[in-house]
Every structure is written in C-alpha cells, then in structure tokens.
C-alpha cells in the first residue's frame, strides 16, 4: 500500500517532467524582431511635381514586395496547410517582414492636403497588419482554421492596399 501511495505522489512530477520534455507550444515560433529603421523616401523631381503620383508609386512598389514575399512563401509551402520542420519559423519571418513593410508605408510622405488619401491608405495598412498578426498568432497557437482564414484573406488584403491610394 505504501508503494501505491508513493507512486501516486510522484505522478504529478512525472506529468511535469513530460510536459517540460515536450517543450513549449511556441518554442519553434520566434518573437517578432524590431523592424529596421525606415529610410526616408527620396524626393525626386517627379515627387515634387506630382506628390500623389509619387505616393501611389511608392505604395504600389511596396505592395508588389508584399505580394512577392507571399508568392515565395506559397511556393515553398504550396498546399496551404501546416508543415513540419521550418514552416513555423519561415511563416513568422514572412509575417514579420510584411508587417515591417506595412509599418514603413505609414511613414511615406504625402502632403497634408491629401489627408483623405492618407486616411484611406492608413486604414488599409492597419487592416493588413491586423490580418498578418492574426495569421501569425494562428500559426503560433497551431490554430488550423485561423491559419486557413488568414490564407483565404491575404490576397484581398494586398488588393485593398493596392487600391487604397
């Protein structure tokens, strides 16, 4: 009887040791690094003559970067499901880079007279950033339906950015 009580007393310790050996659910998901410093957009003669055109060009160039990163990620992980190995860290890196691009786009210069355009673009950027962070959280927590929601919505988010200015 004493042996049974001893084993029952040790059972919680075995559970703790088993959980510690399995690791943390987020152990393969790195924390987002700080974004690199934003380099100011150079003001060309075109930008001085047509600030809205220069702004639209900068937005579209950055959206093209986001779309390329998305395409590259999808080529590496084509069927839209979770993978073993480096999937989680690659996804985190992809999300973090696209969020940094979007945050830098908030800093693109636009004359004060175009506040409505700025508000529209900032709203689309905020929606995109929230979508990306929700996708990152879904992968971190291994939420397959959340990841599928992210996957279904990413193209619409990029299109909203492209159409904003």
Image: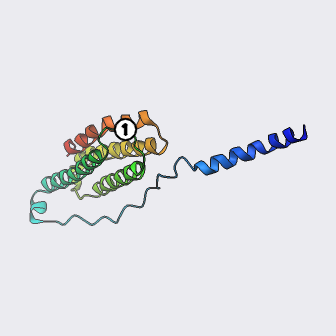
Instruction: Please give the name of the residue rendered at 87% of the width and 41% of the height, measured from the top-left corner.
Output: 3
Outermost residue, right direction? 2
Left or right of 25? Residue 74 is left
Where does the image place residue 88, in percent across and percent down from the top left? 42, 49
Given residues 14 and 61, the one toward you in this image is 14
Q: What is the count of numbered marks?
A: 1
**Circle 1 residue:** 81
Given residues 94 and 119, the one toward you in this image is 94
Instruction: Please give the name of the residue rendered at 40% of the width and 43% of the height, measured from the top-left corner.
Output: 83
Instruction: Please give the name of the residue rendered at 11% of the width and 56% of the height, measured from the top-left corner.
Output: 50
Helix, strand, or loop for circle 1?
loop
Which quadrant: the N terminus?
Answer: top right
Where does the image place residue 149, in percent across and percent down from the top left? 37, 34
Where does the image place residue 15, in percent across and percent down from the top left? 69, 44
**Rendered position, 113 above or below 80:** below
The way the protein has been coloured in the rendering is rainbow
Specify the quadrant of the image occupied by residue 135: top left
Specify the quadrant of the image occupied by residue 144: top left
Instruction: Please give the name of the residue rendered at 46% of the width and 55% of the height, measured from the top-left corner.
Output: 30
Given residues 119 and 89, the one toward you in this image is 89
Q: How busy is the neighbourhood of tag 1: few (under 14 within 10 Å), some, or many (20 plus)?
A: few
Where does the image place residue 114, in percent across and percent down from the top left? 21, 50
């Amino acid at each position: 009887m004493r042996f049974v009580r001893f084993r029952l007393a040790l059972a919680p310790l075995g559970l703790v040791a088993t959980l510690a050996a399995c690791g943390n659910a987020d152990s393969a998901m790195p924390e987002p690094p700080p974004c690199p410093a934003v380099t100011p957009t150079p003001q060309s003669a075109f930008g001085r003559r047509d600030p809205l055109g220069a702004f639209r060009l900068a937005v579209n160039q950055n959206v093209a970067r986001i779309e390329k990163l998305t395409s590259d990620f999808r080529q590496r992980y084509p069927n839209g499901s979770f993978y073993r190995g480096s999937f989680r860290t690659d996804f985190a890196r992809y999300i973090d880079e696209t969020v940094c691009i979007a945050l830098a786009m908030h800093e693109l210069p636009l004359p004060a007279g175009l506040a409505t355009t700025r508000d529209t673009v900032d709203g689309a950027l905020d929606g995109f950033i929230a979508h990306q962070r929700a996708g990152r959280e879904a992968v971190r927590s291994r939420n397959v339906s959340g990841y599928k929601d992210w996957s279904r919505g990413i193209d619409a988010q990029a299109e909203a950015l492209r159409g904003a200015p």
